[in-house]
């Protein structure tokens, strides 16, 4: 909604408005991000008091395009250096272009040949607004781009602003914490070449009082799988600005004459109903506007990694496939160790042909066996990597990131290929295309097991570009493979959850969220993951007990019930599972198939009652509740569990007992769980709304 002569625009979504103005100095300023406003109400924002030198609380000058203000001492979202050494921008507003859900503001530098476009995009049916930035060098001399944040979001004044973030490490990804925002700049990000296990590109801001079910929250996520930075800045009187972008300090990009730098999407979301409704809105956005095949439910996969690691033959894989099929699995994935000289992690990475000792007749017999069992066939690859002990490295030692006269650090005996080089990217694409064309492969698990170190590109006159072009070329390879092999489905993995973001999700079908498969640890990892990403992509394996990583012993039902909150998979050594566990596993797999549409495509609500935690998924008339309780204290009985979002006037039949419950009672008093009093109790409860 542009208001003529006022230079005021409102990006309206079903429930929210994001109102911006171009002020008298041609600066793009955020005036409102919150509940939807009428055009008349939006115009009234211009009457509010504001002074850059004596700010009214919560009304400091706030720039959506953080450039060009002589008095802006905080983080600047767009920073450039021109060929003569002049820094920063002085922008002149050229025009606002509106077309089909897009609103693009075009600015040009007052003196230098640079055009800046910032685009807001809204989609029907979601409150998520996407923002990107494009910088175009309209001259001939090089311009150095030091920072190009996709979005600088202006959050309205809050009394005690609080930041929610997802942090972690290998084996402990997506840990959710909420902390009061300190004054100054709080920076989270990745300098590792990947999204990272340590931080995920998503934050939520609230006023310190939001709960799962109430209160306004503001949230943003970056759709990018390389390095990134989110700067949360709290001004002297409490206002919060969140600047989101790719790249990390101190790298810079050189923009040649005629070149354009396009940033990835930063998505922003305001919701009024607490953290769970924000999470749900992110899930809906992912399903409607990010994932390539959102309408498909994911198959139950079996993955061989924890069963065999590197020690297997083709016959071992076939035996596992037989057991997996008998349990009801629908997709069999052979993990690492099938190619080149890869019988341990010291050799073979980069050589994507079947190991001749393990597969003397190629992959055909195993694939035929798996397909014969009624399952699809998937395979593990790690295309961005090379072991120095490999044919590929021996042929092209210069294809890895490195700096002249510097050591090349190995992690897990491997180096990172310079995928930013077009010839390397072409080679990788060709090898994978060949593998997929010559074999009936339905699914690829694409792994990436080590961060960048000594990331140099000898011979390049713009080596910092690798931090951007590696990810862009990765995306291009994935896009090409998908286009040429339309039935192919892809899982993104990076030593567990090191590369989970909306950029990757745009071109993959599911993600491996952690190498930690301990069901108790998984509850927290899954809960953090679900703050932004939907259950539809959250791979969750049931593995052996004691768990190989934590040595914790956890009953089979508990392990299944935790994994059933996502895309259920099996990853244990089925060759040693007892007949009893096999049979119970098959029952639980069949239970999951019944609840799968609700879990993968429904609305998620986190649940808690005393020591019991769980999730509720609703879709149509189906409500599924999965609950877990590690241990009780003092023999106290479990409290009733209150459910969320049910129709108070409807009645629901409990599939376990046949009892009929009133929605109003389930919401205000709760559901009796009837859990086993022993430790590690769990349950899956199906409620059906009666007509
Ligand atoms: C790391 C992954 O997260 C594991 O699932 C497994 O695929 C190994 N890599 C194989 O090397």
Image: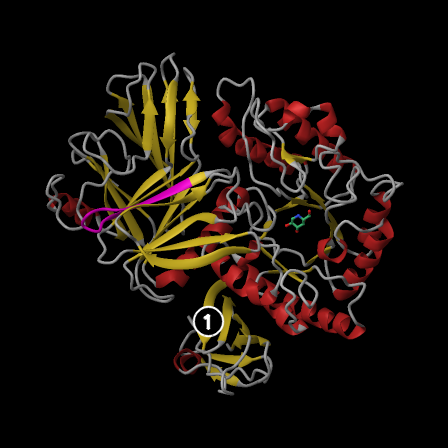
Q: How is the image coloured?
A: secondary structure
| Residue holding disc 1 | 607
Side of 114 where 331 appears, left or right: right
Residue under the point 34% across and 63% down: 273
Q: Indicate whether residue 236 is drawn in magenta.
A: yes
Q: Is residue 277 visible?
A: yes
Quarter of the image where the N terminus is located? top left
Residue under the point 18% across and 50% down: 237
Residue 253 vertical placement versus 196 (above, below): above
Q: Position of residue 190 (x, y in %)?
A: 46, 42
Q: Quadrant of residue 132?
A: top left
Please tell me how many numbered marks the rendered image carries: 1
Residue under the point 43% across and 25% down: 253
> Magenta segment range?
229-240
Depth check: give the residue in front, 44 or 512: 512
Residue 456 vertical placement versus 409 (above, below): above
């Amino acid at each position: 909604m542009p208001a003529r002569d006022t230079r005021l625009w409102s990006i309206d979504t079903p429930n929210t408005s994001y109102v911006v103005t171009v002020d008298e100095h041609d600066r793009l300023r955020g005036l409102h991000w919150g509940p939807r406003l009428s055009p008349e109400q939006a115009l009234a924002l211009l009457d509010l008091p504001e002074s850059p030198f004596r700010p009214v609380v919560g009304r400091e000058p706030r720039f959506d395009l953080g450039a060009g203000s002589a008095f802006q001492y905080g983080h600047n979202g767009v920073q450039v250096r021109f060929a003569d050494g002049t820094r920063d921008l002085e922008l002149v507003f050229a025009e606002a272009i509106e077309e089909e859900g897009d609103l693009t503001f075009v600015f040009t530098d007052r003196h230098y040949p640079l055009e800046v476009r910032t685009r807001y995009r809204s989609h029907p049916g979601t409150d998520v607004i996407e923002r990107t930035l494009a910088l175009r060098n309209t001259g001939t001399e090089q311009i150095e781009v030091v920072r190009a944040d996709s979005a600088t979001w202006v959050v309205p004044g809050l009394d005690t602003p609080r930041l929610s973030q997802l942090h972690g490490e290998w084996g402990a990804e997506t840990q959710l914490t909420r902390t009061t925002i300190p004054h100054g700049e709080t920076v989270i990000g990745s300098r590792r070449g990947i999204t990272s296990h340590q931080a995920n590109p998503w934050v939520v801001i609230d006023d310190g009082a939001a709960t799962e079910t109430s209160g306004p929250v503001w949230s943003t996520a970056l759709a990018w799988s390389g390095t990134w930075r989110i700067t949360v800045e709290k001004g002297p009187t409490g206002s919060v600005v969140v600047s989101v972008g790719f790249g990390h300090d101190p790298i810079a990009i050189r923009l040649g004459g005629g070149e354009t730098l396009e940033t990835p999407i930063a998505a922003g979301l305001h919701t009024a109903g607490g953290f769970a409704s924000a999470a749900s809105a992110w899930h809906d956005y992912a399903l409607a506007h990010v994932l390539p095949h959102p309408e498909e439910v994911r198959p139950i996969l079996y993955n061989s990694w924890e069963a065999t690691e590197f020690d297997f033959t083709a016959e071992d894989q076939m035996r596992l496939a037989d057991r997996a099929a008998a349990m009801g699995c629908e997709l069999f994935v052979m993990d690492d160790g099938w190619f080149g000289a890869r019988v341990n992690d010291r050799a073979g990475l980069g050589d994507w042909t079947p190991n001749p000792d393990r597969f003397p007749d190629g992959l055909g017999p195993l694939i035929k066996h798996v397909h014969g069992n009624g399952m699809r066939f998937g395979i593990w690859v790690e295309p961005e990597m090379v072991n120095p002990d490999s044919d590929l490295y021996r042929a092209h030692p210069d294809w890895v990131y490195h700096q002249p006269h510097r050591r090349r650090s190995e992690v897990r005996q491997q180096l990172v290929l310079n995928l930013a080089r077009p010839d390397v990217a072409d080679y990788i694409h060709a090898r994978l295309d060949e593998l997929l064309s010559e074999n009936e492969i339905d699914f690829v698990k694409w792994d990436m097991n080590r961060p960048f170190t000594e990331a140099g590109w000898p011979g390049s006159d713009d080596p910092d570009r690798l931090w951007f072009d590696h990810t862009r070329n990765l995306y291009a390879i994935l896009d090409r493979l998908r286009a040429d092999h339309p039935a192919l489905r892809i899982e993104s993995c990076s030593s567990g959850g090191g590369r989970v973001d909306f950029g990757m999700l745009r071109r993959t079908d599911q993600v491996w969220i952690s190498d930690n498969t301990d069901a108790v640890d998984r509850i927290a990892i899954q809960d953090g993951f679900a703050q932004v990403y939907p259950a539809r992509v959250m791979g969750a394996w049931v593995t052996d007990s004691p768990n190989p990583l934590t040595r914790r012993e956890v009953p089979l039902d508990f392990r299944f019930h935790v994994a059933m909150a996502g895309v259920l998979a099996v990853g244990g050594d089925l060759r040693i599972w007892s007949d009893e566990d096999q049979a119970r596993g098959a029952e639980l797999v069949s239970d999951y198939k019944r609840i799968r549409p609700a879990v993968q495509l429904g609305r998620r609500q986190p649940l808690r009652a005393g020591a019991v935690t769980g999730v509720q998924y609703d879709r149509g008339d189906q409500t599924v509740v999965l609950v877990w309780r590690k241990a009780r204290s003092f023999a106290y009985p479990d409290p009733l569990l209150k459910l969320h979002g049910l129709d108070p006037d409807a009645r629901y039949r409990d599939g376990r007992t046949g009892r009929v419950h009133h929605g109003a009672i389930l919401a205000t008093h709760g559901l009796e769980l009837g859990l086993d009093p022993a430790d590690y109790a769990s349950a899956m409860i199906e409620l059906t709304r009666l007509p």
